[in-house]
Amino acid sequence: MKQHWQEFKESEPGERFKDRYRRRRQDEQGHIVWRIFLITLGLVIAVGSLVLSPLPGPGWGTVFIGLMILAGELLPAARFLDWLEVRLRKLWRFTRKVWRASVFGKVAVILVATICVAAIIYVVYLLLFSGSLF
């Protein structure tokens, strides 16, 4: 497990999950039952966590764990996570730059984060309690 983590860390951002997918395809000849089990497990964790994300608990972290399990078995999931990693790294660098710029930057980051959280809560509320978004 330690070796797998080291290989994952050493891969370039934007290629990590595809590299992991390729290594898994080379390392194991893949018993179809085991692959189906892992795909099912990943889907259950990701979708279940997504549905339960408004509730207190691990929420979004477990969504990504489910997606990571899927990425080891499905190339489209690996490509999506690589794409997402690159975008999140850019967003993080930009947010950190704005945060460090001034007090106004800190207020702007807090305001945007608050609006995003409020929008997510509103959409979840509409989905759970009104039956439709419109």
Image (spheres, rainbow, N blue to C red):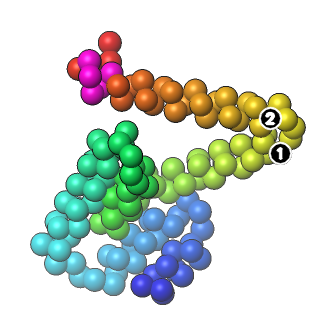
The quadrant the C terminus occupies is top left
Q: Position of residue 131 (x, y in %)?
A: 23, 20
> Left or right: where does residue 102 sit relative to residue 65?
right
Marks 2 and 1: in contact by CB < 8 Å? yes
Q: Residue at x 48, y 26 (%)?
A: 119
In primary-sequence order, the first of circles 1 and 2 is 1
Report the residue marked by disc 1.
100
The residue carrying pointer 1 sits among few (fewer than 14), some (14 to 19) or many (20 or more) residues within 10 Å by Cα, namely few
Q: Foreground: 116 or 35?
A: 116
Say which mark, if any, is on residue 62: none
Q: Where is residue 60 in the image (x, y as percent from the top left)?
A: 42, 49
Q: Residue furthest top?
A: 134
Circle 1: element type: helix
The residue carrying pointer 2 sits among few (fewer than 14), some (14 to 19) or many (20 or more) residues within 10 Å by Cα, namely some
Q: Residue furthest right?
A: 102
The quadrant the N terminus occupies is bottom left
Residue at mark 1 to residue at mark 2: CA–CA distance: 7 Å
Verify whether residue 74 appears in magenta. no
Q: Where is residue 63 in the image (x, y as percent from the top left)?
A: 37, 52
Verify whether residue 128 appears in magenta. yes
In the image, the segment drawn in magenta is 126-130
Report the residue marked by disc 2.
105
Q: Residue at x 71, y 43 (%)?
A: 95
Q: What residue type is labelled 1?
A: Arg
Circle 2: element type: helix
Q: Is residue 71 visible?
A: no
